[in-house]
Amino acid sequence: MEQYYYWQTKATSTVVPKLYYQSPDNWHTEFRYNYEDVQTASLHFGKKISFPSIAGLEIIPLGGIIFGKLNGASLGTMVEVSFNKIYFSSEPQYVYSFRHNDQNYFYSWSELVYEFSRSIYGGIAMQHTKSHGEANFFEPGIVAAATVKNFEIPFYCFSPFSPNKNFVLGVNWQWKK
């Protein structure tokens, strides 16, 4: 379970919950709210692929349905690569609106972090958005996180040197059987 709180210096705040389930045979289900758009929910499905010849690489191709203020479909993937204390993840996705082409967009959230200890990591993050008919928008950021038992608390600051900073605070809980 992931719970994120987004706020900007000149915009409204948003709460974004994400619930995951991964079965023992690596089928992945994910529910999101306020992620693709405010007042919008989505349900995604996929299957994790591991590569025995490339330790630390996992990919989950995802397809989903989006409903609420935005109604449509989504195709994306979750990519994770870890090597020693370095970790890279990226979640690109394309959102297609059933109603209006101008609501279609590509979005990606990526981060590259270093694990300083078993409970602290930090690094860089990037949001990339390409909305229909608009230029690419890249928003670099920094991330720092602490973990305590099954809880992870990441804090992000995007556009840290801009007057329009964008902050994200997460409280994530993971349960493994």
Image (cartoon, helix red, strand yellow):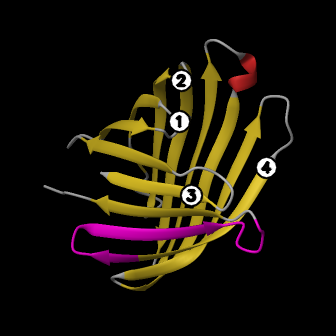
Farthest residue to the bottom: give it. Answer: 117
Residue range corresponding to the magenta coloring: 146-163
Which labelled disc corresponds to residue 69? 2
* Horizontal and vertical percent position of residue 94: 63, 32
The location of residue 76, given as percent across then percent down, is 55, 36
Q: Which of pointers 3 and 2 lies earlier in the amino acid sequence?
A: 3
For the residue pair 163 and 149, the one nearer the viewer reads as 163
Residue plotted at (54% across, 18% down)? 71
- Which residue bears the numbered disc 3? 7
| Amino acid, disc 1 | Val
Q: Is residue 58 above or below residue 70?
A: below
Q: State which tag comes first along the sequence, 1 or 3.
A: 3
The answer to whether the residues at label 1 and label 4 have Cβ atoms under 8 Å apart is no
Give, as a three-letter code, the residue at label 4.
Phe
Cα distance between the residues tagged 3 and 2: 20 Å
Seen in the image, is 118 located left or right of residue 5? left
x and y, in percent, of residue 96 in the image: 63, 22
Question: What SS does tag 2 mark?
Answer: loop
Query: Circle 4 is placed at which residue position?
Result: 137
Question: On the rendered structure, is 54 left or right of 139?
Answer: left
Q: Is residue 121 above or below residue 92?
A: below
Residue 124 position, x and y percent, is 62, 72
